[in-house]
Amino acid sequence: MKILVTGGAGFIGANFVYYELNNHREDEIVCLDKLTYAGNLETLTAAFSNPKFKFYKADICDREEIERIFDAEKFDVVVNFAAESHVDRSIENPEIFLKTNIIGTQVLMDASRKFNVKRFHQVSTDEVYGDLPLDRPDLFFTESTPLKTSSPYSSSKAGADLLVNAYHRTYGLPTTISRCSNNYGPYQFPEKLIPLMIANALENKPLPVYGEGINVRDWLYVEDHCKAIDLIIRKGKVGEVYNIGGHNEMRNIDIVKLIIKELNKSEDLIVHIEDRKGHDMRYAIDPTKIHNELGWLPETKFADGIIKTIKWYLDNKVWWENIISGEYKNYYDKAYKERIEKAK
Ligand code: NAD
Ligand code: DAU
């Protein structure tokens, strides 16, 4: 089988590239990535030495280039990870989110129709369901929960999901969609909560917690997400949506305190800063369907996964130090400097 992985130089896409190369040695993996600020070729260094791996630098919105690549490669399966993925950036500049996440998905699906791709898998997110109240721990997102988005990011992902379902119903494109909760693990860009807190704590910098830090996310180790997608593309039912989550709900403040403890730092580093606009309170996935139909269960417990992740960031300082010394520094100063000053 030949699998196209778009966005494979990013966090989850790269972990998926390695998952496939390690677990399906007979398959060919082609990665296509625009290498935006979030894409990093260094992440794929080990993949480049595998003869079953190939890389294209391309934009999923560039119809001509995408069709040329699809024509040349004749993919069996397309897994679309490519996206603008950071909620805070979407609040500052929604446009690129609509372009990449919606138009880019459309371009990939048009090419998939034209070149007879057997499965188009869309990597979506639990954020399309909006949020749940903190005082109703009995509520969970199921696949039939209505879409009700809060941020430009989640709206662009929901828009893409609707379009995927429309391409299935209208044109018969063999699609599947997965909606996963928050991932953590190796190669996550240090703008996201867990790697940002690890990197800042290691450098004794302030740890910027939005508001009181009581928002809840349902954390899943990235390899478990990759395994779920692998099962869906091989055994999942065409036209279906699958929720993926680990029943591992945690408050942001508790994650930050855990990282501080593991790194032997002081809680005095925590700064409660002005909240994210439209901040979702709680996400919680009900993964019953993927468990019952495909036998998927998360394998990594949070207590083990977070230690592995912290160790990875300690062992791979050069990887994230290169990132935080580049363009990211301007983003960080713009997003945090004033809010941290104000909070002091
Ligand atoms: P990421 O930001 O780390 O990586 C995104 C990748 O897409 C980067 O390599 C980037 O260069 C590439 N990209 C962006 N625009 C592109 C374009 N126009 N053409 C080609 N490539 C482009 O994101 P991530 O956290 O790895 O998320 C991957 C996918 O999973 C996204 O679709 C996201 O919505 C979804 N998701 C993420 C999480 C999470 O917790 N991180 C959870 C659920 C779903
Ligand atoms: O739920 C899946 C989603 O998880 C994915 O679709 C997104 O691509 C991914 O970025 C992630 O979105 P979140 O907004 O939940 O993740 P983030 O790491 O940005 O924030 C996690 C929580 O931590 C959130 O409640 C905001 C808070 N936070 C985040 C940052 C970056 C802070 O308190 N301080 C911070 O500096």
Image (cartoon, rainbow, N blue to C red):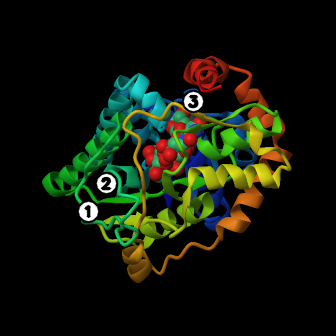
Q: Earlier in the sequence, mark 3 or mark 2?
A: 3
Residue 82 location in percent, x, y?
A: 46, 40
Q: Earlier in the sequence, mark 2 or mark 1?
A: 2
What residue did someone put label 2 on? 129
Q: In this rendering, would 199 be left or right of 11?
A: right
Between marks 3 and 1, how big is the CA–CA gap? 34 Å
Secondary element at tag 3: loop
Q: How many marks?
A: 3
**Are discs 2 and 1 less than 8 Å apart at CB?**
yes
* Residue drawn 72% across the image and 55% down it: 258
Q: In this rendering, would 121 be left or right of 103?
A: right
* Residue drawn 56% across the image and 48% down it: 13
Q: Quadrant of residue 135?
A: bottom left
Between marks 3 and 2, how big is the CA–CA gap? 29 Å
Residue 197 location in percent, x, y?
A: 69, 41
Task: Give the residue type that dot 2 points to.
Answer: Tyr
Q: In this rendering, would 149 be left or right of 247?
A: left
In this view, the residue in front, 164 or 206, is: 206
Residue 275 location in percent, x, y?
A: 48, 35
Q: How dense is the environment of label 3, judged by Cα within 10 Å: few (below 14), some, or many (20 and up)?
A: some
Secondary element at tag 2: helix
Q: Which residue is situated farthest in the front direction here?
A: 344
> Is residue 81 in sight in this rendering?
no
**Are discs 3 and 2 less than 8 Å apart at CB?**
no
* Residue drawn 34% across the image and 64% down it: 141
* On screen, residue 194 above or below 217: above
Q: How dense is the environment of label 2, judged by Cα within 10 Å: few (below 14), some, or many (20 and up)?
A: many
What residue did someone put label 3 on? 35
Say whether mark 2 is within 8 Å of ligand 2: no
- Report the disc number at residue 145: 1
In this view, the residue in front, 344 or 12, is: 344
